[in-house]
Amino acid sequence: MDDLKGKICVITGGGGVIGASLAEGLGNAGIITVILDINEDAAKKVAKQVKEVTGSASYGMKANVLDKKSLQDVHDKIIKEIGDVDFLINGAGGNSPQATTKLEELTENDIDNLEDGFFGLEMEGFQKVFDLNFTGTLLPSMVFTREMVKRQRGVVLNISSMNAYKPLTKIPAYSAAKSSINNFTEWLSVHFAKVGVRVNAIAPGFFLTNQNRFLLLDEKSGDLTLRGEKIINNTPMGIFGEPGDITGTVLYLLSDMSHFVTGICIPVDGGYSAFGGV
Ligand SMILES: NC(=O)c1ccc[n+]([C@@H]2O[C@H](COP(=O)([O-])OP(=O)(O)OC[C@H]3O[C@@H](n4cnc5c(N)ncnc54)[C@H](O)[C@@H]3O)[C@@H](O)[C@H]2O)c1
């Protein structure tokens, strides 16, 4: 994948767990990374670490994926101070407790307690999660691909999720938004197919990260929680992914090795999406 060396890749949400791990993997492949995050300190910290660990240039900047002007400003700054953007990874995303139901499903015992299910969802929380995951991919794509289209060269990589194929219980906004990412990936790939810009996605399975460790492992014993057990039982490889497991698939989709590949979403999931549960 020598074609990747010296290319410039913008990673939104790059201050987060997956973004940081990806940035390191890309840096090891000689790619110059620009870490964008609403949390400027996190973006700068990741950039510093990537530079130290990989020796490749990395820059951390503040940007809000829900604010077109903020994206436009940072885009212009990158072009002026660093160079043309070759790749965009739309990594900002996530769920929120405000968009999560208490119950997994309703039974006849819950009829007097409907607020714990679908009916208790707050529209504000629902909208926030939907916007972060969908609009937060749409807007950076709009801002960063204009120059790619003019140069007739570039790659967009979106981050989907297992929720895109079959929704997980409790998180309908996140599930619907990630499903929309797969649809948008296909739409944009067709729109750009004749102007040299490829658009693909990856769908990570279950990764043990600092944010979900408490949900998946018992703090004291380190044993799997019930939810953690369910996930492992439905992951044919029988393990959680490590953030670094995503790197190879991403490098392939960014590289010219996949020059005839556009509009797809590759699961990186230890077999989770292939398993019917029996
Ligand atoms: N962790 C997992 O197991 C997993 C699984 C499947 C998919 N994903 C997806 O991977 C992506 C990264 O997830 P992660 O686990 O690294 O999450 P994370 O919470 O560690 O990182 C997300 C980053 O996005 C930033 N962000 C939030 N709102 C923003 C905004 N408006 N503008 C710019 N940046 C903003 C946050 O500050 C944070 O640094 C997300 O799209 C997530 O949905 C994660």
Image: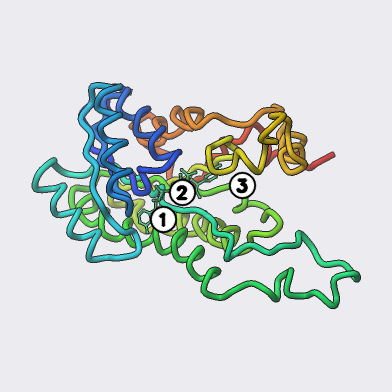
Measured in 3D between alpha carbons, the distance from the residue under mark 3 to the one under mark 1, in whole angstroms, is 23 Å
Q: Residue at x 23, y 47 (%)?
A: 61
Measured in 3D between alpha carbons, the distance from the residue under mark 3 to the one under mark 2, in whole angstroms, is 17 Å
Q: Quadrant of the N terminus?
A: top left
Image coordinates of residue 173 in percent, x first then y, are 58, 64
Identify the residue at the far front of this view: 220
Residue 263: give its label: 2
Q: Is residue 20 above or below residue 265?
A: above
Q: Quadrant of residue 9?
A: top left
Instruction: Say if mark 1 contacts mark 2, CB within 8 Å.
Output: yes
Q: Quadrant of the C terminus?
A: top right
User: Which mark is first along the chain, 2 or 3?
Assistant: 3
Q: How many marks?
A: 3
Identify the residue under disc 1.
Answer: 190
Identify the residue at the far left of this view: 80
Identify residue type, mark 1.
Answer: Val
Identify residue type, mark 2.
Answer: Gly
Q: Residue at x 34, y 59 (%)?
A: 65
